[in-house]
Amino acid sequence: MSFTRIYKRWEDKLATPFEKYGVIVSRYPWHVLMACVVINCLLGIGLIRIEAETDTETLYTPQNSQSKVDRAAVQAVFVEDMSGTNFHSKSITEENKYADFIVKTKNGSSILSTAYVDEIENIYNRIKENVNVTSGDTTADLTNVCALRNGKCVVEGDVVFSTVFRNAMTANAISYPLFNFEYLSGTFGDAQSTGSYLTSAKMVRLTFFLRQDTTTAMTLSEAWEDKYIEVLGAMSSSLLDITYSTSSSLDDELDKNVNGDIFYFALTFTMMLTYAGFATSGGDCVSDRQNLGRAGVFATCFSILGSFGLVSMVGVKFVSIVGTLPFLIIGIGLDDMFILMSCLADSSFKGTIEDRIKETMRTGGVAITITSITDFLAFAIGASASFISVRNFCVYAGAAVIFCYLNQLTFFIPCMVINERRIAENNHCGTCQPIKTREELRTEGKSKCQVFCCGGKAPKNRGDNESYLEKFPKLLFQYIVENPIGKIAIVVLFVAYVTSTVYGIMNFKRGLLLSNLVTEDSYYHTYSKLLENHFSSEITIGFTVTSAQNYSHATIQSRVSDLLSNASADVDINPRFRSDWLTDYKRSMFYSSASEASFIAGLKIFLTIRTDHANDVVLNKAETQIVGARFFVLSKDIPESEQKGNIMLRMREVADNSPLPVVCFSWPFVFFDEYASVFSITFTTVGIAIAAMFVVTVLFMPHPLLVVCVTGTMVMICAGMFGFMYYWDLTLSGITMIDIVMSIGFSVDFSAHICHAYITVDGATRKERVHKALDRSGGPIINAALSSIMGILILAFSSSYIFRSFFKLMFLVMVFGLAHALLLLPLIFSLVGPVTELTPSNTSSDKQVNVETPKDHQANTSSDKHESADLSNVAISVPLDVTTSDNTTISHL
């Protein structure tokens, strides 16, 4: 038995439950429809419990990552928060509360002049005077909320106001990057130096670190941050441009993004209603299906309501990128709608409504089930990712896909039955009132306008109610695939595609810029762009010894020295900086190694003088042993995300190779883990998803050629997504990973439709079957792609990077899916595809097989598919087990 016959027998079994459902919905359409609407509306009530997650670290860093494990180990040793007594930024294990601002000259000149420094100090003083908050009976200004060191506020960058700096600036003798024991690389933007002296800089950054050591201090600091944003938003300068942020700015701006843009969705909804109506407008006042097309849009909208309500009800938090889903789901819903409508148009117009719906469900039900399962599985696998942003998005998306599928069966199919009943009763498509045919109206002498607007009859064939968008676009692809020059063009096109993909994959980057998480009109976006593009990015990296050691012993001291030497030897580590309390203590007059007790006694005195090291040593309660210690190195400027991830991995390797029980950690590592792991996480997820899609294809389309075609197409499209990210200036991150995971499901959709159509149509030659497959599925695929692109098109104009990147990648997957489904796969089928095999029940020695020629296809569209395809009025007798003119064998099985 051939694979084609196995496939058809398997499909018969799969189609049986859909046929039975078709019978039920044909008899009780209004019951099913109302049940669908009520259930979706009831579930939609769950939206009142919707809760947003906007914490950047939670959303865009891997859960249970190495950096979070290491941070917990460090925090277990260094428990006390020192922001209220002895704050040093190098010692923090989480991003501290802060507020900062960047100023730059309006004319682009160097900021190193007395007039500019005076203006910066003026801004600084206005902040101290005007940013104050009230809590109970207490009014708090900067001096009440700032982090303290030696009893003074810690303001990074305030060295520019000192007399020492002003004198050095006047003398053109500002040593750089180290000046007066402070590193200036983070203070000046677009800095230029000659001979270790700063010659010019166009920007200055000041950072106010805030207290968070008590609950009261944390509350005041948070309130002060809010007031700071309000004051800085209204502040201006005649000499300088001011940008600003706080530690909560990114989360606050993400919270604004979560609300989405209702106008965009309303506009998209209107566009899709218009497109669906136009794409299904054809025939006369009876056969026209515009309202049925609009029903498909409403079915999708109900699925968004029901799925979002259900997921919100069970407590899954909403994340900002979920705001793109309504635009996407509308496209998915219309994809299913066009397939179902095409299958209905293919059904016998001579049968009853129940028979036609059964036949529609037999073919269309299986087709949309395959694509819905692949889409759902892609999201289900994505929901296992370690990024909360990806996980929550995939939960919302997976639920929306399932609801979209169910609503097609319980909302759109009943609407289809109701519309068929209207047609059978010869009722007007708009008024639903009985009307006469156009011929009858002409006989009665009615005006042309009245004939056109008020006349009609039930369609007799597929062509009677097809719109221009359903008839003509597919003819182009039929012509290209059947034309020898077109076939050559397809080969050249896909060779270029593969070449471009390989080059793009070799050069694409990974990493996520925080500025891309907010809209371009956000104050935080302006600030972060300046910080990313104009200031150096140097990371203080800590090595924490997590258990008690006898640091008076030469062996331990040697191990610490080797650890720091190995770290400093790295190409990206600044060898001029090292925060090493042990070395500094050994050089002091208080050092004693006679015993551990004398070592600790001298160290305690040393730390009261060198308070910069006081936070780096932890003694036990009896102060007889050092139970924890840490040492620091400083990286060079590392602008690229990938470099940051790599240096983190190399420093961890240095720690792992040390005989000491040491952990390498810096608080930015929590975000660097995203840079280092997103590649492996994405490819693991994609690999699992592709394997799952392969299994689904085998189960639903058990034909070796189809399995190879669908799987190969899926791999090619996914590879193209990675490759073309490079050309569209996109990096692999937690955001684009979502789009990649989505593309896996959608890359199957179009190819599955064309494969399913090819294997289910009849034809004596490959050319004929390709022609018929394109006739059946070409229109729906084109309309599905266009509707999906239209659904996301509005996102291209969004000021949000999240929305724009979503549009770019979904546009790619639609274009690539369309090209593979309507060009590459038909070309493959025309060369090696199986041909129709005649069953014993319809074969005999004198059986006539009517073969349709390509030029006869136009006429064939007007005849029922169950009727003889004798369109050229010539019956061509083809004996069984013979070879036709194109070397295709028709076998009697």
Image (spheres, rainbow, N blue to C red):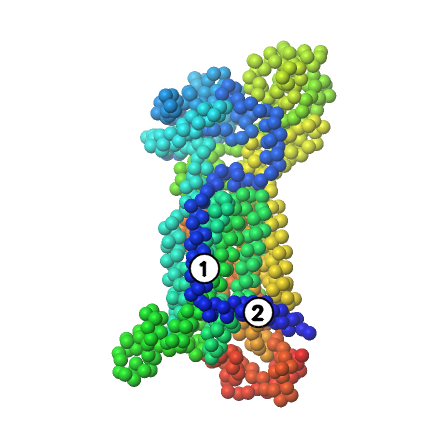
**Marker disc for residue 36:** 1
- Amino acid type indicated by mark 2: Thr
Residue 818 placed where, x, y %?
51, 63
Q: Is residue 832 above or below residue 67?
A: below
**Residue at x 56% of width, y 62% of height:** 370
- Dot 2 crowding, Cα within 10 Å, few <14, some 14–19, many 20+: some
Q: Amino acid at mark 1?
A: Cys
Q: Position of residue 55 (x, y in %)?
A: 49, 38
Q: Secondary structure at mark 2?
A: helix
Vertical relation: 474 (above or below) 801: below
Q: Position of residue 657 (x, y in %)?
A: 70, 32
Residue 67 in which image quadrant: top right
Task: Spot the residue most to the bottom.
Answer: 846
On the image, the x and y values in percent for residue 793 come to 42, 55
Q: Determine which of the numbered discs, if any, sits on residue 16 in the image.
A: 2
The local secondary structure at tag 1 comes to: helix
**Badge 1 density bin: few <14, some 14–19, many ≥20, Cα 10 Å:** many
Pointer 1 or 2: first along the chain: 2
Q: Disc 1, disc 2: CB below 8 Å?
A: no
Residue drawn 65% across the image and 26% down it: 546
In the rendered image, is residue 855 in sight?
A: no
Q: Residue at x 47, y 47 (%)?
A: 312
Query: In the rendered view of the protein, which quadrant contains the N terminus?
Result: bottom right
Residue located 45% across and 24% down the image:
216
- Where is the C terminus found, in terms of image quarters? bottom right
Q: Which mark is residue 72?
A: none
Vertical position of residue 92 compared to residue 318: above or below: above
Marks 1 and 2, how far apart at CA: 23 Å
Q: Residue furthest right?
A: 555
Residue 741 versus residue 482 in the image, above or below: above
Q: Can residue 253 be seen by looking at this rendering?
A: yes
Residue closest to the eye, 167 or 9: 9
